[in-house]
Image (tube, grey):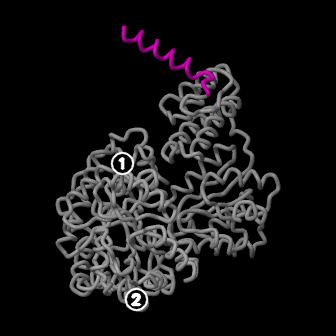
C-alpha cells in the first residue's frame, strides 16, 4: 500500500516538473521529461539520483544531447540562480558535482571526451592553500563547456608559466585569499611578459583588488567567479586583456 | 567633553553611551611588517613565543594608536589543538591548515588537555603579558574562532560546505564540539586578562553559506558562546552580512564587526526596527583602502563611516601585513578630527 502511494506521489512530482517553469523560481525547461528530470537533478545537486537517470537516458538518447540539453542547461540555471542571489555557494558546489558525474557517464558512452570550446589554466597563488574560489571558477568554466587545466593550490610561479606554455590556454586565472601571497601574481606577469606570451591573466579572491590586479601587465580583475565564463567567451570572440579590463574593470 | 582614556572610550561605545570620539581598533589581526621591524618582533617566531606575540600585538597601541590590542594573528589555534597540521608562511605569511585531520563521519573526542595543546599556552601567556603591560591603557581583546568555522578546518571547507547543504544534521555534533573548544579557550583568555572576546566566524559568511544554513548551523553556537562568556563579545563575519545582521544581533553579542560591503544605514534601520541597539564596528576596506590606498582614501572612508553611524572604526577584516603604518594611523587621525 505504501509503495503504491509513493509511486503515485512520484508521478505527481514528475508531472509537476515537466515544463513547470515557475516552480521554485526555475525558469529553464527541457524538451522532454527525461531531460527535464536530469536537469532538475543538477539544479537540486542530487548526485544520488543523477547516475541512474543519465544511464537510463543514454539507452535511447545521444550523449551530447544529454550533456547540452540537460546537464549544461541545468548548471546554467544554477549559475543564474546564484547570480541573482537565490542560490548560495554550497548549492553551486553540489550542482557542479552532479553535472560532472553526468558528463562522465555521457563521455564514457561517447568513448571520448566531449569537444571543448577551449582551454583555461587555473591556479591558487603560491603560498596560498585556500582554493575554494578556484574550485568554483573551475566548476563554472566546465559548466560552460571549457576544458580546465587545474594546477591546484600553492602553485609555484614557474609551474604556472610552464603550464601556459604547454597548454596555450585562452586565459590563465589566479586566486589568492591571503594578501601575503598575491605578489606571486606580479611575478607570473613579469615572466609571461619576458617570454612574450600575450594572454589575459584573470586574478581574483579576497586578497586582491581591482587596483592591484590592473597594476601589472595582462592582469584583469575578476570580481567574482561568475564572471569567468563570460570573460573566456569574450576572449574566444577576440577580446584582448586590454579589452577585458575595459569591459570588467572600469 | 573630557578626553576619555582608550578603555573608557571603548566601553562607552560598546554600551551605546556618548564618547569624546569614536574608538579606533582592529577587530581582526593588526600586525604588519612595519611594526615587526620597529618592535623587533617578527613572524614566524611571534606565532610561538608569548613575549614576542605580546610585543608585536602591543604595536596596535604604541605604533598605531588604537584603543585596543588583540591576539592572536592567525585563525588556527583551535584547529591545531584538534590535530590539524599547519603550513607556515615564513616571515611573511600566516599559518593555515594544510592537512585537515578528519573526515565527516569520524568520531572526534574533545582533547582532554585542550588548553595545553599547540600554541594555546603561548597565546594565553601573551594575553597575560598584554594585560600587565598595556592593560591599564587599552582594551585587551582575545580572539577565538566561531564553532562553525573551526569545524570547517577539521574537514576541509569543500566537503564541509557541501555537507552543510546536503546533510546539515551530520555536522551538528562536530560544531557542538567546536563550540566547546572556542568557549573553553575564551574562558581561559578571560582568566588571563582579556577584557573582550572577539569571535571570528569567517566561514559563516554569506560568500560561503546561505542565511538558512547560518541559522541552522552557526547562529545557535554563537549565541551559546556569547551567553557563556562573562565579558563583552564581538562577533565578526566576513562579507555581506546584510541578510543575517538582525540574527547576529540576536545572539546577544556586544557588537558586530562588519565589512564595507554591508549597507550600514540599512543594517542600523533593520536592527532598530527589531528594537536592537547592537553597535556596528568597521568602516575601512582592508585590501582596497588600507593596503593599496593612500591615507587620503582612508580618511575618506572613516569620515563616511562616522556619518553612516558606525560605533567604532575598524578595518572590515584582517589587516594585510604589508599595510603601511601611515594608512593605519590615518584611521586614528581622522577619528580625532571629531574629538568633542
Return the x and y of residue A236 as percentages of the image width and height.
79, 52
Residue bearing mark 2: B63
In reply to whether residue A155 is colored magenta, the answer given is no
Question: The C terminus of chain B lies in which quarter of the figure?
Answer: bottom left
Whether marks 2 and 1 lie on the same chain = yes
Residue plotted at (59% across, 45% down): A84
Assign a secondary structure to mark 1: loop
Q: Nearer the viewer, residue B159 or A163?
A: B159
Residue B19 location, x and y as percent? 34, 77
Q: Quadrant of residue B16?
A: bottom left
Identify the element where label 2 is drawn.
loop
Q: Is residue B33 visible?
A: no
Residue range of the region highlighted in magenta in the rendering: A1-21
Camera-side residue of B67 and A74: B67
Counting from the top left corner in percent of width and height, residue A63 is at: 68, 29
Up-down relation of residue B298 to residue A53 (above or below): below
Alpha-carbon span between mark 2 and mark 1: 44 Å
Amino acid at each position: 500500500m505504501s509503495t503504491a502511494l509513493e509511486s503515485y506521489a512520484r508521478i505527481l512530482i514528475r508531472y509537476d516538473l515537466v515544463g513547470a517553469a515557475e516552480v521554485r523560481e526555475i525558469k529553464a525547461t527541457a524538451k522532454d521529461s527525461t531531460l527535464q528530470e536530469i536537469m532538475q537533478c543538477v539544479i537540486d545537486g542530487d548526485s544520488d539520483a543523477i547516475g541512474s537517470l543519465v544511464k537510463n537516458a543514454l539507452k535511447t538518447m545521444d550523449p551530447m544531447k544529454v550533456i547540452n540539453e540537460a546537464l549544461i542547461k541545468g548548471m546554467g540555471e544554477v549559475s543564474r540562480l546564484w547570480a541573482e542571489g537565490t542560490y548560495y555557494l554550497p548549492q553551486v558546489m553540489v550542482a557542479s558535482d552532479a553535472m560532472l558525474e553526468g558528463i562522465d557517464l555521457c563521455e564514457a558512452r561517447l568513448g571520448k571526451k566531449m569537444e571543448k570550446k577551449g582551454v583555461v589554466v587555473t591556479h591558487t597563488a603560491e603560498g596560498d592553500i585556500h582554493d575554494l574560489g578556484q574550485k568554483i571558477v573551475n566548476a563554472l568554466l566546465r559548466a560552460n563547456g571549457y576544458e580546465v587545466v587545474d594546477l591546484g593550490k600553492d602553485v609555484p610561479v614557474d609551474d604556472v608559466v610552464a603550464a601556459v606554455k604547454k597548454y596555450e590556454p585562452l586565459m590563465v586565472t589566479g586566486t589568492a585569499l591571503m594578501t601575503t601571497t598575491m605578489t606571486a601574481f606580479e611575478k607570473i606577469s613579469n615572466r609571461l611578459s619576458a617570454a612574450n606570451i600575450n594572454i589575459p591573466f584573470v586574478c581574483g579572491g579576497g586578497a586582491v583588488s581591482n587596483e592591484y590586479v590592473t597594476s601589472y601587465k595582462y592582469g584583469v580583475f575578476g570580481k567574482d567567479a561568475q564572471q569567468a565564463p563570460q570573460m573566456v567567451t569574450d576572449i574566444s570572440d577576440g577580446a584582448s586583456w586590454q579589452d577585458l579590463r575595459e569591459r570588467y574593470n572600469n | 567633553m573630557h578626553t576619555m582614556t582608550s578603555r573608557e572610550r571603548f566601553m562607552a561605545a560598546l554600551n551605546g553611551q556618548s564618547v569624546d570620539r569614536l574608538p579606533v581598533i582592529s577587530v581582526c589581526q593588526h600586525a604588519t611588517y612595519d611594526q615587526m621591524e620597529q618592535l623587533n618582533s617578527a613572524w614566524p617566531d611571534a606565532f610561538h613565543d608569548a613575549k614576542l606575540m605580546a610585543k608585536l600585538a602591543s604595536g596596535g597601541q604604541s605604533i598605531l594608536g588604537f584603543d585596543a590590542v588583540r591576539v592572536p594573528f592567525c585563525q588556527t589555534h583551535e584547529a591545531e589543538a584538534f590535530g590539524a597540521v599547519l603550513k607556515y608562511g615564513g616571515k611573511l605569511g600566516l599559518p593555515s591548515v594544510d592537512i585537515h585531520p578528519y573526515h565527516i563521519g569520524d568520531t572526534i573526542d574533545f582533547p582532554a588537555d585542550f588548553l595545553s595543546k599547540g600554541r594555546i599556552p603561548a597565546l594565553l601567556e601573551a594575553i597575560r603579558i598584554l594585560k600587565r603591560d598595556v592593560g591599564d591603557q587599552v582594551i585587551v581583546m582575545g580572539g577565538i574562532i566561531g564553532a562553525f568555522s573551526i569545524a570547517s578546518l577539521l574537514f576541509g571547507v569543500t566537503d564541509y560546505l557541501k555537507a552543510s547543504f546536503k546533510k546539515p544534521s551530520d555536522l551538528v555534533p562536530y560544531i557542538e564540539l567546536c563550540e566547546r573548544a572556542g568557549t573553553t579557550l575564551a574562558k581561559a583568555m578571560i582568566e588571563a586578562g582579556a577584557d573582550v572576546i572577539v569571535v571570528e566566524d569567517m566561514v559563516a559568511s554569506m560568500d560561503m553559506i546561505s542565511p538558512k544554513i547560518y541559522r541552522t548551523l552557526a547562529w545557535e553556537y554563537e549565541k551559546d558562546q556569547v551567553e557563556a562568556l562573562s565579558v563583552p563579545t564581538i562577533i565578526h563575519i566576513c562579507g555581506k552580512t546584510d541578510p543575517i545582521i538582525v540574527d547576529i544581533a540576536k545572539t546577544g553579542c556586544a557588537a558586530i564587526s562588519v565589512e564595507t560591503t554591508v549597507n550600514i544605514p540599512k543594517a542600523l534601520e533593520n536592527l532598530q526596527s527589531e528594537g536592537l541597539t547592537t553597535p556596528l564596528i568597521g568602516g575601512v576596506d582592508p585590501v582596497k583602502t588600507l593596503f593599496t590606498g593612500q591615507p587620503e582614501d582612508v580618511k575618506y572612508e572613516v569620515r563616511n563611516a562616522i556619518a553612516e553611524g558606525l560605533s567604532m572604526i575598524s578595518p572590515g577584516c584582517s589587516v594585510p601585513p604589508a599595510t603601511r603604518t601611515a594608512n593605519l594611523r590615518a584611521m586614528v587621525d581622522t577619528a580625532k578630527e571629531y574629538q568633542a
